[in-house]
Amino acid sequence: MSQSPLEQLRDYSSRRTFLKKSLTSLGAFAVGDLLANTAGQNIWKGTLENGTHLKPKVKRVIHLCMAGGPSHLETFDYKPELERLHGKPMPESFTKGEQLAQLQGKNLNIMGPNFGFSRHGESGMLVNNQFPHIASISDEIAVVRSMYTEQINHDPAHTFFNTGSIIPGRPCMGSWTLYGLGSTSANLPGYVVLTSEGGGQAQPISSKQWHNGFLPSKFQGVQLQSKGDPVYYVKNPNGVDRDAQGNLIQTINKLNHMQLEASHDKEIAARIAQYELAFKMQASVPELTDFSKESKHVLDLYGCTPGDGSFASNCLMARRLAERGVRFIQLYHRGWDHHGGLAKNFPVAANHVDQGTAALIKDLKMRGMLEDTLVIWGGEFGRTPMAQGSGRDHHIKGFSVFFAGGGIKGGTVYGSTDELGYSAVENPTSIHDLHMTMLHLLGVDHTRHTFRFQGRDFRLTDVHGKLIKGILA
Amino acid sequence: MSHSKRLNFLVLALGGTTIAFLLYALNWTKAAELGDLPAILTVAGNFHPILLHLPIGVFLYLAFAEAWNFLDRACFKRGQIKGGLPILAFGTVTAVLAAFAGLLLYLQGDYSGDLINDHMNWGTAFAVSSVIVFCCALIFSAHAQVYRIVLFLSIIALTVAAHQGGLITHGDPLEPLFKEESITVAAKPIEAITSYEVVDKIFQAKCYDCHSVGKKKKGGLLMDSYEALLAGGKKGNALVPGSLEASKISTYPHLPLEDDLHMPPEGKPQLADEELEFIDAWILAGATPDARLIDEELPEALYNWAVIYMETDLIRAEPELNVPEEKELVDLAQFINEVEQHATNSLSRVGPDGQHLVFSALNVRDTFNETGVEALIGAAPYLIEIDLSYTSLRTDAVAELLRETAQLKRLNLSGTEVDQQITEALATIETLESLVLFEAQLTADSIAALSNLTQLNSLYLAGTNLSLIQLEQIHQLLPDVEVVDDHFLSKHKP
């Protein structure tokens, strides 16, 4: 993609007008250059179409985002010391001068782990008893117990997790991935997002989390509905069949071509492409959502009714999207913000997520797809070792995330927090490191994957990013 | 002529005293402790660069005048010395002053090394000789030969001293004449390069002119050895391992260019961003003299920069070692155009030079046919992955494609028919690591042949028509292969 800065500026400024003018919900992703497409070129290829920087280990990423911030102390980070000191005041040496969210200026007392842990798998990994399904695949996953982030509230923390910057407006990791590697699906968007909720207060997730920022807008994430029709108005109205619809689109595109020849406005070309992909999706989306061929034991594995809006249903959809060439998939489960009632609500959230997560990984494994997929599971931050009433507050200095899939060494536990689970002390791992490692596995050198915008070469990892070598096979 | 004799005596006495004093001052200076001069003497020393040019001009003029006289004499009669006396007096006085100022400048402590030592010797020698020339001009006014000889000798001293002074301040003016491609750096493998060598190379290029033995020692600081860095200079610590704040080799370059303390000084070649970044990283990592570059925990970009920075020397030293072997790159774009006429968005180039191909028929599972496979055969030697899952191709076409591959690592035949032709072709692909046969329909012959695929790392057999006994057999015959079948679920129950 060698555009002059002027062309980039034009693209950027007109994208917004384009989205505003867009009449259908498909407008967000159907942007592209149809002229190039009709000339036999593929508009969905990325900048690395002539070769990746490194040999790729994986082709696609599935990010299971536990939105709200699950407690690391009740998932993967067992702290006996916390148990022993339950109810005692938090030593001031930990918290003095620290940034706290809602606990600022409050009495800080230690809360021990609410649920027990057991060892699982050949590695003997400690997993909380609330996650029996995930525990059953502990030999497939690598847990990083020493993640830290920079933002203590949900939306900025998600923004940082997705874009590597706390400043809204930067491209998210899914868009960066597509920008480099392109989309492998010819009939579906290359980057799809689904959400679900349950188990705690569902904090809002803004669509800016899957925004392309200054990258070409065809690389932004497309949200499908978890319930009912995944795309609104995807069916033809009564009395219109596929041929008639095709004729209509063709005629509109002919007219648009005439206008394009007269004006050379790229956004008209984009509009033409939008109509074409939308027409293709009228066929591909019903096929995507036709779960009738899923066998009973697969449905049992996930434990859901397809299309019921649950996280497990989204996981099944994620597998189907992956099979159809979608490169970047994000599932947000909004249910982990346990400021209060943790003992009661945490098991509910865990129950929503546990089986679907494990089912997805097992299903991918059986189909030989886990070895070229990277699965990332985790929240935007963790939760405090200190009690906030009956819950825990937001916590950014140490939390757990797990990885599974191609290039990942299963059964690994990497890094650790201090004895009270407050700060990452061994192998502290930043979000930039996570991004760098993700790109590395996709075959992309994060330092060479840049986009010039406003006179500067931007990259997902800014000036940071170290390989998390310890979790790699 | 008693008047003249008295004058001569006076001149001799004055000249002798001056010479004695000069020689004493030279000796005293060499033994003296450097630095901490009274301000007035520091200022006097700073005048050395101005004063020294005056006697150079004067003595060169006198030499020129003698040459002139020589020609003049050849044509008319002998030339005159006396007309030159006031200017000779001026030259002598400034030569002596310049020598004293030079010694004072040395006392400031910014210079060290053999070159400066020689320069002081020769500069003093010239000042002494200028006094002798003056005395001779007065006393032997009738014997011009004597004057000419001492003048000639003094000009030799002048030339040597001036050249050394020039070397110290401006470098060798004749260098361009003798410049050769540097071949002094021995080729070193990357494992043998220490971080300090990188730092030292940066210093050599940007700092040595003012901070090294044999050149200058500005601020009392030498930077040409690890020990010298630790010793620091007049302004304090140059290097405190682990602390950027305490290490002036980091803080001074970070100051704004306009700052008086900024180093290198404004107008001199500045440190590049990466150079400064590397110095900082080295200090933070503990600034040891012998830590190897490859062991440092550096950001990848910085490490790569350092490798390139150091290897420029290697390339110059032994060019034939470092020219990468010209790999013949094949233009794989032609295959992509050809294949994608049958299967949109199906072929992609991966790896650093895009010489590997990954094929997937996922967009055209229903329509991909044998003609498409034929188009793909041309690209087969470059394919590392093939995904034909859920296509309905004839098995002989698939087997033919597989036989044409040369470096296939991953094959997905999920949901397709697999017969003996295919398994026979697979047995010959030694590079094959992963075979996915999820929901594949296997013929009896092909099932038996699966046990021969010992080259595999993983084999996916879930959803196939294999019996329990057949699976058991495969597990037994392929102990080193991860065989994933339907029992994966029961083995991984919560």
Image (tube, rainbow, N blue to C red):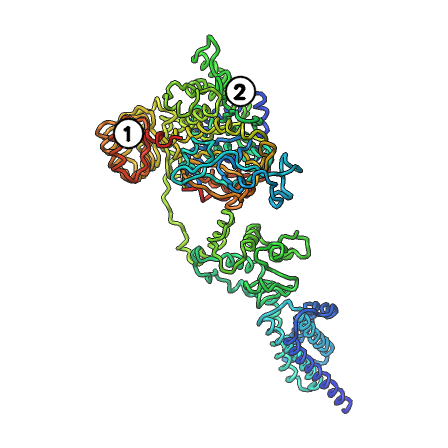
Name the one closer to the observer, A375 or A47: A375
Instruction: Identify the residue position indicated by label 1 in the image.
Output: B398
Q: Quadrant of residue B130?
A: bottom right
Q: Position of residue B166 (x, y in %)?
A: 61, 67
A190 or A150, which is in the foreground?
A150
Report which residue position mark 2 lands on. Answer: A25
Residue at point 43%, 34% (across, down): A135
Q: Position of residue B104 (x, y in %)?
A: 69, 72
Q: Chain of mark 1?
A: B
Q: Indicate left or right for B443 with B159 as reference.
A: left
Name the residue type under label 1: Val
Which residue is at the far bottom? B2
The answer to whether residue B78 of the structure is visible from this angle is no
Say what secondary structure mark 2 lies in: loop
Query: Looking at the picture, does residue B105 appear above or below residue B300?
Result: below
Is B275 placed above or below B229 here?
above
